[in-house]
Image (cartoon, rainbow, N blue to C red):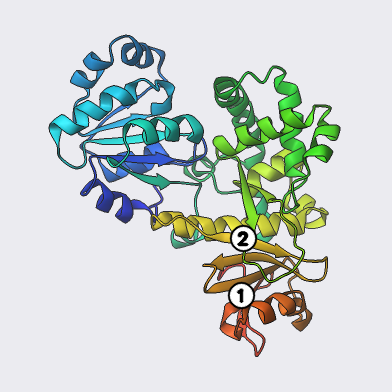
Amino acid sequence: MIPREMQPKLLDLARKFPVVTITGPRQSGKSTLSKMTFPDYRYVTLENPNNREFAEIDPQGFLATYHNKVIIDEAQRVPQLFNYLQGHVDAADEPGQFILTGSQNFLLMDGVTQSLAGRTALLTLFPFSQTELSSQGKLPPTLDEWLLTGAFPRIYHSAIPAGDYYPPYIQTYLERDVRSLANVGNLDSFRRFMRLCAGRIGGIVDYSELAAEASIDQRTARRWLSILQASSIVFLVQPFSKNFNKRLVKRPKLYLCDTGLACALLGLRTADDVALSPFRGALFENLVLMEHLKRQWARGVQPEVWFWHETATNEVDFIIGSESSPQAVEVKSGATFSAKWFKSMKVFSALANLGPDQRIVVYGGEDSLVTSQGKVLSWRDW
């Protein structure tokens, strides 16, 4: 098994809180991480119909059976269990009683915030990071292969080709998560909506355009996008909010949880397809974002990331850090560095008074360097 960077933080929180809740996309490794970290804990999944029925019909009996040092997988499947869990946790009054996992953030977080506030620590686990794969010699050898393959653990643990992994993943997501989150109706229409979202990676969300192309109304488009967010498939990046007396874009940008999933939705089947695709730059931008988020989440930190867009020539792909001490990150998929790449962050750098150490270009080449304008990082070093 490939070690996860989050493991030390998970252990630390389990020594402090009676419950630790781990959310993230389906098959991101939540159950495996929990079992690796707590091998002496019992494991029960509420995806199993018998376990789910037991918890629904007799929650007190369920918690009497699974009463301490237990991993409850897909805990959001029985929302009423959280109410009983609260009393059980308070009565035992000791840390590390339960590890809860779930792939539907909306339902799980709703239960957590209502019943377990102050009793649980919260972690977010996404598929493997570049660092995790590199440390085990598992990172795909080229950028295009990395974009195509994505980072879902089962691909690496079971040596499943990306082309074989993602179609059933998407089908399972539609049939289990989407059906249970909302009454979507036509799953084929929702699948088309997912493909349209994949085609807008790195773009500013336009609900009217999405609705028109998906042949749905704007209200439905907003609801469907919220479902993709709730199940950790889509991530929205908000515009940088500090007021520089500029007219700025105020809508978020859209990204997917994994580039391999995005490639599957876009119909890209080989590394050559990716290399020649008009979406390659957007996919690389998506990769850079997710690697930053994974680093923060592994430390138990809620990431702060924005974008800045005044005009097509005055924009910054990502602002990371904090509003009071930001770093500007520009993403370029080209393999040959050009000093012109710093140009688009010139206006923001002046407004935010950024020094060279606060300006970063991440590119598709192999060599990292430091210039008078800022840092240049290879995708391997990001």
Find out whether the residues at labels 2 and 1 contact each other: C-beta distance under 8 Å: no
- Give how far across and how far down residue 356 sits, in percent: 61, 85
Above or below, 81 against 305 in this view is: above
Q: Quadrant of the C terminus?
A: bottom right
Q: How much space separates mark 2 and mark 1, taking CA atoms?
A: 20 Å
| Residue 49 occupies quadrant | top left
Q: Which mark is residue 377?
A: 1
For mark 1, give the secondary structure: strand
Q: Residue at x 37, y 32 (%)?
A: 114
Q: Nearer the viewer, mark 2 or mark 1?
A: 2
Foreground of the two, 266 or 80: 80
- Give how far across and how far down residue 353 sits, in percent: 62, 82
Q: Amino acid at mark 1?
A: Leu
Classed neighbour count for the residue bearing mark 2: other residues with Cα under 10 Å, few (<14), some (14–19), many (≥20): many
Is residue 142 among what the camera can see?
no
**Residue most toward the front?**
245
- Give how far across and how far down residue 149 sits, in percent: 63, 48
Q: Which mark is residue 306?
A: 2
Above or below, 271 against 22 in this view is: below
Looking at marks 2 and 1 on the same chain, the residue that comes earlier in the sequence is marked by: 2
Q: Amino acid at mark 2?
A: Trp
| Residue 146 occupies quadrant | bottom right
